[in-house]
Image (cartoon, coloured by chain):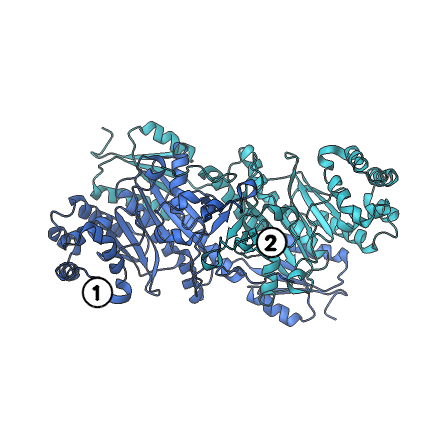
Chain colours: A blue, B cyan
Amino acid sequence: MSLVKKPVNGMKDILPAEMQIRDYVQGVIKDTYREYGFAQIETPCMESIANLSNKQGGENEKLIFKVMKRGEKLNLETAKTQADLVDFGMRYDLTVPLARFYANHANDLPSPFKALQMGNVWRADRPQRGRYRQFMQCDIDILGEPSILAEIELILATTAALGRIGFQKFEVKINERRILKAMAKCSGFAEEEMDSVFIILDKIDKIGIEGVAEELKDAGFAQANVDQYMALFEGVRQAKDGLSYLEKELDGFLEEEVVVNLKEIMDCVNGCKAAEFELAFDPSLVRGMSYYTGTIFEIVMPEFGASCGGGGRYDKMIGNFTGKDVPACGFSIGFERIILLLMENGFQIPRQPEKTAYLVEKGYPAKKLKEVIAKAQKAREDGQQVLVVRMNKNKKFQKEQLAKEGYEKFEEFFRRGKEE
Amino acid sequence: MSLVKKPVNGMKDILPAEMQIRDYVQGVIKDTYREYGFAQIETPCMESIANLSNKQGGENEKLIFKVMKRGEKLNLETAKTQADLVDFGMRYDLTVPLARFYANHANDLPSPFKALQMGNVWRADRPQRGRYRQFMQCDIDILGEPSILAEIELILATTAALGRIGFQKFEVKINERRILKAMAKCSGFAEEEMDSVFIILDKIDKIGIEGVAEELKDAGFAQANVDQYMALFEGVRQAKDGLSYLEKELDGFLEEEVVVNLKEIMDCVNGCKAAEFELAFDPSLVRGMSYYTGTIFEIVMPEFGASCGGGGRYDKMIGNFTGKDVPACGFSIGFERIILLLMENGFQIPRQPEKTAYLVEKGYPAKKLKEVIAKAQKAREDGQQVLVVRMNKNKKFQKEQLAKEGYEKFEEFFRRGKEE
């Protein structure tokens, strides 16, 4: 037989133990986000290939799983390029589809609109340990809200959800694209150099600030600019209040509202937060996506090196669909990393129902089976979980297997009554 | 701008009102199935194209969305056929992936294994009203259980879930592939004619039994066979107990256990059912999929002409992956049809939390905003749903929009205190 038992390369099957945790966590996240007034929506997993390939997705656009045209539209003979063969692609994130969704339905939605999305996305990355080519994303976005109310609510909701799952003492880093730019500009970097500067700065978690300085010099940037840039970061590090320090240093390079807004966001979040975490200004936070226009933020867990979620403001994306900009801000939980962390730490789901397995011997008479089922039905009506299965020859092994699935109580039903 | 606002052809965006109902129904189904001991699993949305194209999927195999190879594996120049360009396909059901999953993980799973799957599937059908090319399926399957215990538990669990959603007075039709075959054989049809006979019989809901007779004759089947076939159906119709009638008439064509099993399933389900429905033997029930080997069943809602779910026994499919047959039986709820029915009937979700919207005027001072947010946080901790949004200029319209989303209470916060 030529059938393949393994999942396709880079994707994974999810077994019951992990699935239970995923489902529980999804439930907590959904319930929390609903309390904050986010309304769940869904878009198809496929988008028109044009929507996915217009440069908003950055590097992700190189990783699209492309879907072949069908029927008469597909002509292998005349096709010259990939584009002739493909019409749809698998979405690589939930943000581009949300922008399309909002452009399509804005008239039927309240404004501002608070959206919740949980769904799979696909990226044809090189398969590697712990990273999969299909994975769940879990995003909230507020569309049509230009003020800091969006940032405050997004950070409070996301951290409340993480807190309810059981995470604490994590950190939310916050920065502003305009501070990022002002620091670079004030250091003498030209506008067109900035993307390259930020790509190097983004490696700071791995190579440290000295490593960044090194790489910037190696990349050929002027020594004076690099020195000035480093002095700014060092200034923030030493200042009691990094934001006020930058406000002064970047005078003339930065709109006044930027620092005011960040301070107000931090003050309000710290005063109202429902979970135990630190919200900290970090001028080195970059966030890769080029669509961000304002605030950016990222979750860092002490147990986990890399980011466990993040987001920011992207006020220009919806305009790509409608021709009219709509302020937008979103926060995405790194769902797969959260699950990985919980699994590694032996997470136990609270408040599980009692689980009982009825083992029924082979050849058990149908009349009496009805009584067994009736008993199970009664327990189920009371909210208990009852598994009715046939008893295997190796009953001991069967019970061990079931115990792994959380079955603690067993009842046995023998063909001739009592244990033989 | 060349960006497309609509979802891709044949797929749909799901707005908050429908999403709430979908989420509620999914929750009820999941909770019910868990009480019956089904464990949720998940497989990737893509499968190797070989697994999807080995004739088990019947007509669905013509409807596969195919995923193009990537990177070096893709060579347009040398590709002669579609097969050279494609490695993955979108799954068209959850049964083939489940068989692969079980073949891959049987050693890590209890036996018998009761699986629950809820997930999207894709079929490149011609788009038409009410039928979409991406849709949710909701399946339970019992793998490794050869006895009627599987059928009984599947029917009880599925009908219990439907009952809890609020459906009643529906019908579950039941039949057996071996009865279907025995009736055809006993009427004189040859083995190789049967598939064509069943395809015509399957139209009975639309054309009636006379229509079936007509079409069989038009298709060139012998008059005597058609007459004999019709006489059997008429016999069942007139008999007090259709199954006993067939048991006698099909003597020599049918294993004894078939009727005994069906009777026992019906007796046990009728005695233990947790919802108000009729389980009825229907000798004309065909179920399209060729992989069924034994019992087959189907849900019919009085409000809805077509089937709202179905399933059956498929004891040979897993053997295609492992070389060793594993008894298997499954039941799938027609999730999209259920949702459609509920939406059309103005379904209201029970026990919704109180929803309050705080409208905050533009320019509301940050210091005071903090107090508003703190108030919202407190209500959320008590499980209330609180939306904090900026107040629009057209406040009346905004409130109307929010009322549509279920917000009943409003609080307004003005820049200068009290209403101006």
Structural crowding at the residue carrying mark 2, measured as other residues with C-alpha within 10 Å and reported as few (<14), some (14–19) or many (≥20): many
Whether residue B378 is visible, yes or no, is yes
Mark 1, residue position: A218
**Disc 2 secondary structure class:** helix
Query: Which residue occupies the foreground of this view, A257 or A65?
Result: A65
Residue at the image position 62 percent from the left and 53 percent from the top: B53
- Give coordinates of residue B15: x percent, y percent: 45, 38
Q: Nearer the viewer, mark 2 or mark 1?
A: 1
Residue at the image position 67 percent from the left and 57 percent from the top: B317
Quadrant showing the C terminus of chain B: top left
Give the numbered dot on residue B42: none
Mark 2, residue position: B52
Alpha-carbon span between mark 2 and mark 1: 51 Å
Query: Which residue occupies the foreground of this view, A109 or B414?
Result: A109
The amino acid type of the residue labelled 1 equals: Asp
Image: A376 above or below A326: below
Q: What chain is tagged by disc 2?
A: B
**Going by the image, does B177 lie left or right of A67?**
right
Q: What chain is tagged by disc 1?
A: A
- Give coordinates of residue A79: x percent, y percent: 49, 46
* Label 2 in the same subunit as label 1: no
**Going by the image, does B259 lie left or right of B269?**
right
**Disc 1 secondary structure class:** helix
Query: Which residue occupies the foreground of this view, B38 or A75?
Result: A75
Whether residue A384 is visible, yes or no, is no
Structural crowding at the residue carrying mark 1, measured as other residues with C-alpha within 10 Å and reported as few (<14), some (14–19) or many (≥20): few
- Give coordinates of residue A117: x percent, y percent: 42, 46
The amino acid type of the residue labelled 2 equals: Leu
Query: Which residue occupies the foreground of this view, A231 or B110?
Result: A231
- Give coordinates of residue A411: x percent, y percent: 65, 64
